Image: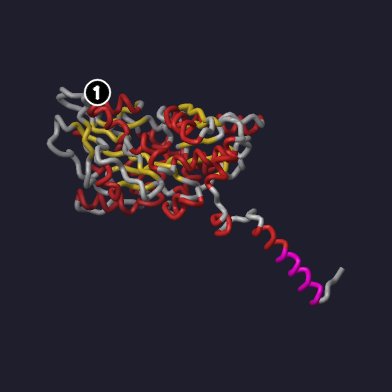
């Protein structure tokens, strides 16, 4: 069948009219959807839905869910679940059509970008009324908060940070005296290596030249691979966050470990008398920021309650328990409290920020980096 020019124009007009009707009914994304956002309407709709469960890597999610329920009259419960288990649960629940975790907070970023989002297991939603306060790079997927992991020393042993360049950690004096989270249990550390290679390899090479006064040979491997190899050969202790923090900060040590750990552990300076100190001015970075997404299960029976909870986490009240631990809110108007123990607020620009746009590549290369570590690790 053929159409005349007039018929084609008429057909295009019908299609345009249908598109306009769709947007007018707020089913399309864009400015109009933002204009019709109604917080009170969302709250009322959420109250009519079944209770929700929120998975998060922090135990503080239990109290946060209780505070949310008290504030809005919408039933929510929090459950501490580590990154890997969150991914497994979200996938299995989706496949079974039996969603338990309606919201996932601070999940495995690489797995979220490589599996959960592209397979339609979860969705990302940013509160329209707060979007002006959320940087573009943190909106899709929505970053609730970023966890700062920083080079850390024992302030009782050292008057100041004993290094100013990551290449110093590959030298003999640090062999057997380094520690970090186990990259086989916390694979985002392997992802960190990949992020460095993809986005900051030249900076690692410059740091080498700054320390040793000569150019690093990168004809056979990247500067990042060379650093990771040499770092692994110094035999860092791989353990959980508490052990790593204690190895660095326990008082009374003659020869404490030098570590990289989350600023959340700095609360133990007060709670346990640790002596953790943040290293600043380290080339090429003093640590990194690991983003924590807020994702909604695609099959949730309580989409409005889930959205309301995500929005709550983007407010000062909702995120306060986490900013107290040095986590950086995705809402740029919210600052860390003045008494946050690590002092990381003054050093944010020194931290390498994860680029979520390439996180799926991190997932693809995760096992390769883990294998690379195994091959080069020496006790």
- Type of colouring: secondary structure
Residue 38 image position (x, y, % from top left): 55, 49
Question: Residue 221: image x %, image y %?
Answer: 37, 47
Q: Is residue 297 visible?
A: yes
Task: Report the magenta stretch's main SS.
Answer: helix
Q: Is residue 10 magenta?
A: yes
Label 1 sits on a secondary structure element that is loop
Number of marks: 1
Q: Given the current orientation, which residue lies at the most extreme bottom position?
A: 5
Decide if residue 219 is on the left or right side of residue 67.
left
- Observer-nearest residue: 159 or 66? 66
| Left or right of 251 on screen, residue 379 | right
78 w.r.t. 229: above or below: above
Q: Which residue lies under the disc numbered 1?
A: 272
User: Is residue 365 shown to the viewer in this render?
Assistant: no
Q: Quadrant of the C terminus?
A: top left
Q: Residue at x 35, y 31 (%)?
A: 181
Determine the residue positioned at 78% across, 68% down: 11
> Would you say 162 lies left or right of 235 here?
left
Does residue 91 show up magenta in the picture? no
Of the pair 217 and 118, the residue shown nearer to us: 118
Judge from the rendering whether residue 130 lies leftward or rightward of residue 153; answer left or right.
right
Where residue 46 sits, quadrant-wise, is top right
Q: Which residues are magenta?
A: 6-17
Q: Nearer the viewer, residue 292 or 230?
A: 292
Nearer to the camera, 274 or 197:
274
> What is the crowding at mark 1: few (fewer than 14 residues within 10 Å), some, or many (at least 20)?
few
Q: Measuring 26% from the left and 27% from the top, which residue is drawn there?
A: 268
Q: Position of residue 353 (x, y in %)?
A: 37, 47
Residue 102 at x, y percent in the picture: 56, 34
């Amino acid at each position: 069948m053929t159409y005349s020019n007039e018929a084609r124009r008429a057909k295009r007009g019908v299609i345009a009219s249908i598109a306009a009707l769709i947007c007018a009914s707020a089913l399309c994304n864009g400015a109009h959807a933002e204009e019709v956002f109604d917080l009170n309407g969302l709250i009322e709709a959420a109250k009519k839905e079944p209770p929700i469960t929120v998975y998060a890597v922090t135990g503080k999610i239990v109290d946060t869910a209780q505070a949310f329920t008290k504030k809005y009259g919408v039933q929510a419960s929090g459950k501490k679940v580590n990154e890997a288990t969150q991914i497994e649960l979200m996938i299995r629940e989706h496949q079974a059509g039996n969603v338990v975790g309606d919201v996932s907070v601070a999940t495995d970023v690489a797995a979220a970008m490589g599996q959960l989002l592209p397979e339609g297991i979860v969705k990302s939603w940013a509160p329209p009324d707060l979007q002006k306060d959320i940087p573009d790079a943190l909106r899709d997927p929505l970053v609730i908060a970023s966890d700062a992991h920083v080079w850390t020393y024992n302030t009782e042993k050292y008057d100041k940070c004993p290094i100013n360049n990551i290449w110093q950690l590959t030298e003999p004096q640090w062999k057997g005296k380094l520690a970090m989270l186990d990259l086989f249990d916390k694979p985002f550390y392997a992802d960190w290596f990949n992020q460095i290679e993809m986005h900051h390899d030249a900076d690692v090479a410059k740091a080498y030249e700054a320390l040793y006064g000569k150019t690093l040979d990168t004809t056979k491997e990247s500067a990042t691979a060379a650093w990771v190899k040499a770092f692994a050969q110094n035999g860092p202790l791989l353990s959980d966050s508490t052990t790593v923090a204690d190895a660095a900060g326990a008082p009374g040590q003659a020869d404490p470990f030098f570590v990289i750990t989350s600023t959340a552990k700095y609360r133990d300076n007060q709670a346990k008398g640790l002596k953790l100190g943040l290293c600043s001015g380290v080339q090429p970075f003093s640590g990194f920021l690991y983003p924590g997404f807020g994702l909604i299960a695609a099959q949730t029976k309580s989409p409005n309650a889930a959205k309301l909870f995500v929005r709550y986490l983007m407010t000062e009240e909702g995120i306060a328990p986490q900013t107290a631990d040095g986590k950086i809110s995705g809402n740029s108007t919210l600052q860390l409290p003045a008494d946050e123990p690590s002092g990381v607020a003054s050093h944010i620009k020194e931290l390498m920020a994860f680029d979520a746009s390439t996180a799926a590549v991190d997932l693809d290369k995760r096992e390769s980096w883990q294998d690379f570590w195994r091959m080069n690790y020496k006790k």
